[in-house]
Image (tube, grey):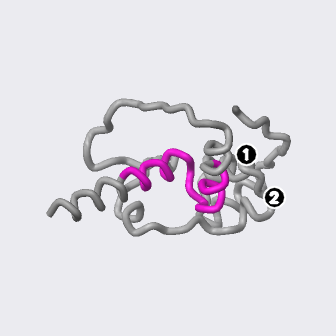
Amino acid sequence: MVKKLNVKVTAEQMAIAHENGIHTNTVYARLKNGWELTKAITEPPKKLPQLAKLKRNEEGSLIAEQPKGRLRSLRLDQDLDDAVDKAIAESGLTMADWFSEIVRKNISSKKRKTA
């Protein structure tokens, strides 16, 4: 279920977000997840060591060192979907970055167990 955003973000507010190191996509993801506007544009995103190593393009999207795989989608039960939305909001990451981080952690922990 896509949540409708009832908040308008002005150019000045977005400039504040950018000054605080918060990408446009992160601001809108936070607002969609119920964050107050002031918090969404002022609370710096959490820095994850694995993501900090990756480069970003001019728009702020992550650039992988390797070619990207195919786009995947999934459908979750509503209660699990709500829990995922909450976890993403609390992380300060975009949805794509959050899911990428979860997959990376899962695969790397499995590699450690088999080694």
Location of residue 13 in the rendering, given as x and y in whole percent from the top left corner:
77, 56
Location of residue 21 in the rendering, given as x and y in whole percent from the top left corner:
59, 64
Q: Residue at x 79, y 40 (%)?
A: 5
Using the rendered view, name the quadrant where residue 114 is placed. Answer: bottom left
Location of residue 28 in the rendering, given as x and y in whole percent from the top left corner:
69, 47
From this view, report whether residue 91 is shown above or below residue 26. Answer: below
Dot 1 crowding, Cα within 10 Å, few <14, some 14–19, many 20+: some
Q: Residue at x 50, y 45 (%)?
A: 96
Q: Which part of the image, by quadrant, shows the N terminus? A: top right
Overall secondary structure of the magenta section: helix
In magenta stretch: residue 72: no
Left or right, residue 56 beside residue 42: left
Which of 87 and 114 lies nearest the eye of the viewer? 114
Q: Which mark is residue 32?
A: 1
Left or right, residue 102 beside residue 79: left
**Magenta residues (range):** 85-103
Q: Which mark is residue 115?
A: none
- Tell me whether the residue at label 2 lies in contact with that at label 1, contact meaning CB atoms closer than 8 angstroms: no
Using the rendered view, name the quadrant where residue 54 is placed. Answer: bottom left
Q: Which residue is mark 2?
A: 36
At mark 1, the secondary structure is helix
Q: Residue at x 49, y 68 (%)?
A: 47
Which of 14 and 30 lies nearest the eye of the viewer? 30
For the residues labelled 2 and 1, the Cα–Cα distance comes to: 10 Å
Which of 96 and 80 lies nearest the eye of the viewer? 80
Left or right, residue 9 beside residue 51: right
Left or right, residue 29 beside residue 34: left
Q: Which part of the image, by quadrant, shows the C terminus? A: bottom left
* Amino acid type, mark 1: Lys
